[in-house]
Amino acid sequence: MKKPSKTNWERVDSLRNEEINYSDIPKLDADFFRQAVTWPTSKKQITLRLDPDVLGHFRRQGKGYQTAINTALREYIERLGESRHPGSQPAIDVRPEMYINPILHIHSTLAEAKEFYDTYGPYSLWGGKKTVAITEVAQGKRNLLIGEPGVGKTLLLAKLGEFFDAKGISNCLITLKDRDSISFIDQSLSNSGTANFALLLDGLDEVKGSLFPSILEKIENISKTAPHIAIYISSRSVFMNRYGASFPEYRVITLSPFTQEQVKEYLVAAGHDGSEVDAFLSRIMSFSHNILVVQIPRYLSLLSKFLYKKQISSVAQISRNEIFEYFIYEKLDLEDKRRNVDGVAAITKRLLEKIALTMEVYQANTISKDELMTFLDETESDLKIAAMSQLDLQELFDKSLLKDNHDSIEFDNTEFQEYLAAKEITHAISRSQVGGIYIRS
């Protein structure tokens, strides 16, 4: 039962306006409204494409997860320096991501693709084979998208999703390394019915070894039993060679790094002077590599961000070492933030430097996991203790600069391996000791 109110409502009702005491709520003047923050209007309903693991993270928070997504996006905007005050300017020059159409080749069979790779390598720019557009990629029913790390496989799948959306074709992009990826596949298939549907499966090569057989079996079953579904699977070439028998009906679309002309196009579109870009590229392209790291779209995007972050107006001011330090630490720091940990990037980098030097000494671009464990056993105790206490080996394979081939590892890019090995030699020299041999000063 509610308690009776002690307020004299009859007296309140009889008060005239001039008798009301406003001393504790002063009248709002023009100054107040000039400084006021305008609260957003009613929310707008849209269809938003999210990675399954991102959506799963928010859904696990329970009721109100849509509001949590909105809050996270608002915090991101405010970190960039944008506010809700009219006329405010962002604190930094934030430019939208640019998309340059990748170099794509279609091969009718795995055997044809393998011959192309064996002849021209994974960075196949010189094959003379006609490149194709996304419209031609979207025409197939069974498709493997093959490319090395960072060439844009995930982004190509997203662009395919946008293409299908525009054509009114239902589709779903699923990250295969997510632990719930099989349930996401089942859910998407149950919602698709018998209509045209495109299943976009990203990162077959990134699936953990323990989950890989079940993922592969699921894809094989769908390939055999659902002819009306278009399937696109992204992976690295090493997995195409290893598990090719599971995809007999698939055609192969290979993605190559950017040409020097595309790198220039990207940097000029980002606001850099064409002649300065030419000077920059002629300097860094002089290194003895068929493909340089700045020709990989992932790292070209990082280069553009680096230029704006450092407020460098001329690319001619940048050294190769500055670029590599930024690329490496930016990637490792990003993984620290994703895992919500601090200081692990520095330990990871020191460990990678030692691994890189070992591989350079043995003139190897890959190392077996057994060899890696032997290396870790022989690593100096302080670094090993720090690494083993703060690093999970699988996360080291998945989230650093290494590519996990299930039974072996290699660096994302041979330039990273060479640069990190050189850094380790520098550390050794600064300690006046290289490989146990002391140097006289």
Image: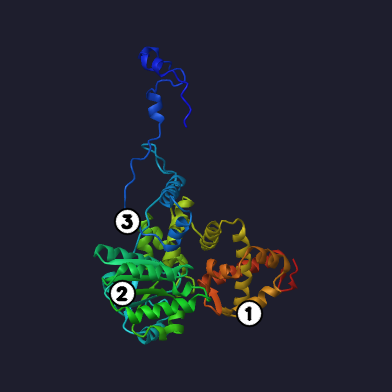
Of the image marks 3 and 1, the number of the one nearer the N terminus: 3
Q: Which residue is mark 2?
A: 230
Q: Which residue is mark 3?
A: 47
Image coords of residue 51 (percent x, y) = 41, 62
How would you rate the neighbour count of disc 2 (Cα within 10 Å): few for under 14, some for 14-19, many for 20 or more? Answer: some
- Measured Cα–Cα span from mark 3 to mark 2: 22 Å
Q: Nearer the viewer, residue 18 or 433?
A: 18
Q: Is the C terminus in the top left, top right, bottom left or bottom right quadrant?
A: bottom right
Q: Is residue 129 visible?
A: yes
| Direction from residue 270 to residue 136 in the image, left or right | left
How would you rate the neighbour count of disc 1 (Cα within 10 Å): few for under 14, some for 14-19, many for 20 or more? Answer: few
Label for residue 132? Answer: none
Q: Mark 3 or 1, which is nearer the eye?
A: 3
| Number of numbered discs overlaid on the protein picture | 3
Q: Which residue is mark 1?
A: 371
Q: Residue furthest front?
A: 1
How would you rate the neighbour count of disc 3 (Cα within 10 Å): few for under 14, some for 14-19, many for 20 or more? Answer: few
Q: Nearer the viewer, residue 255 or 135?
A: 135
Of the image marks 3 and 2, the number of the one nearer the N terminus: 3
Image coords of residue 267 (percent x, y) = 38, 59
Q: Nearer the viewer, residue 396 or 65?
A: 65
Question: Which residue corresponds to the image point at 38% horizontal and 52% vertical from the top-left?
Answer: 95
Q: Is residue 251 above or below residue 338?
A: below
Question: Which residue corresponds to the image point at 35% horizontal and 74% vertical from the top-left?
Answer: 232
What is the secondary structure assignment of the residue under circle 2?
strand
Q: Quadrant of residue 231?
A: bottom left
Question: Which residue corresponds to the image point at 43% horizontal and 81% vertical from the top-left?
Answer: 240
What is the secondary structure assignment of the residue under circle 1?
helix
